[in-house]
Amino acid sequence: MAPNWYRLGPVEELKTKPLRQVVIEGRLVIALSYKDGRFGAVSGVCNHKGGPLGEGTLREDFIVCPWHHWMFHRETGEARPGIPAAVPRHDLKTEAGALYVDLEPATPRIDAPHPPHPVAREPRRAPGPLRVAGLSTTAMHAGFPRYSTSEALLGLALGEAAAAGAETKMIRVRELGFRTCEGYYSKSAQACTWPCSITQMDAKDEMTEIYEALVHWADVALVATPIRWGNASALYFKMIERLNCVQNQITLHDNVLIRNKVAGFIITGGQDNVQAVAGGMLMFFGELGFQFPQFPFVAHSRGWSAEDMENNVMQVQQDGELHEGARALARRCLAMAEGLAAEGEGRAAIERGGRKAGGE
Ligand code: FES
């Protein structure tokens, strides 16, 4: 095809920035670079999710996408060696002190074959009995475990669910190695992806276990947290920030990943603020798509001035009413999950898969 030259501007002026994003006539986007005395022009639209390559950074001769750090050679458009991918390259020429770019790409865009991440599959309830995932978000040293009041109550709730015929799974979030949310959403709404970009790029990131449990496996999520300075635990917040991508699928793409699922909460603290912690958890899990039974949390606190934590632990260990409260929460969640399943395709699957869990 004949070249279609477009005047970008004076050469001397364009030499002043190592990398810039140029939008031509509102449609073609070029990442224009200048380094070691040579210009380079490649498409400014990243192969991954369309990130603005010209707003990224240069690492040697590679442009690093500002969204999730994919890299393309600034002159050839090729991805790093070994990755069969490329963004289109554009020819350049100088004439009478001005730089021109050929609007027709000299090379095609090549997408590397990426099999979809397993967690990206469509959520579909597999046949089987009701399933309850317990997420304990308290932190403790693996080598020197301690008694956790929230985790102990969660254990009772899961035991009750198992006795009612449900499959159960305890996930101790502290045992998972996963990275903090890197705030891609703050760069652009489109930069927050499902599955999370970290999950897709880092095979060692174990947030996958939580995504699998909440999006695909469980009918009920029971989430337990201690109160730390009036809030849920830091580990809880680390986890829910990584769940932003699930919620953003709803707001950005009307893609509701969590349907007909129930959540309940266990909140314990030597000191107070139960209502605020419960309010935050209800809001977030509601925004994910979970539904709640009547009385959706069980909590324990002895108030602001209770500093005798050794007595607090003893009290939780001996408080039969509290133990029954945790068990009753599990029963309410299961009863509601069974009702929700009855509204959807899940009922047949539950009945085929095992005996039904009893409600309260
Ligand atoms: S790395 Fe460029 S959009 Fe994700």
Image (cartoon, rainbow, N blue to C red):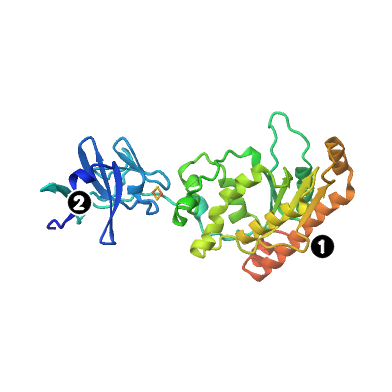
Q: Which quadrant, please, contains the C terminus? A: bottom right
**Image location of residue 233, percent across then percent down:** 68, 44
Residue at 61% across / 40% down in the picture?
Answer: 176
**Image location of residue 223, percent across then percent down:** 70, 50
Residue at 24% across / 43% down in the picture?
Answer: 76
Q: Which quadrant, please, contains the N terminus? A: bottom left
Q: Label 1 vs label 2: CA separation?
A: 74 Å
Of residues 321 and 217, the one nearer the viewer is 321
Query: Which mark is drawn over residue 86?
Result: none
Query: Which mark is drawn over residue 9?
Result: 2
Q: In terms of sequence position, does the residue under pointer 1 or pointer 2 come before the other? A: 2
Can you see residue 105?
Answer: yes
Instruction: Classify residue 199 as left or right of residue 66.
Output: right
Label 2's element?
A: strand
Of residues 97 and 355, the one nearer the viewer is 97
Label 1's element?
A: loop
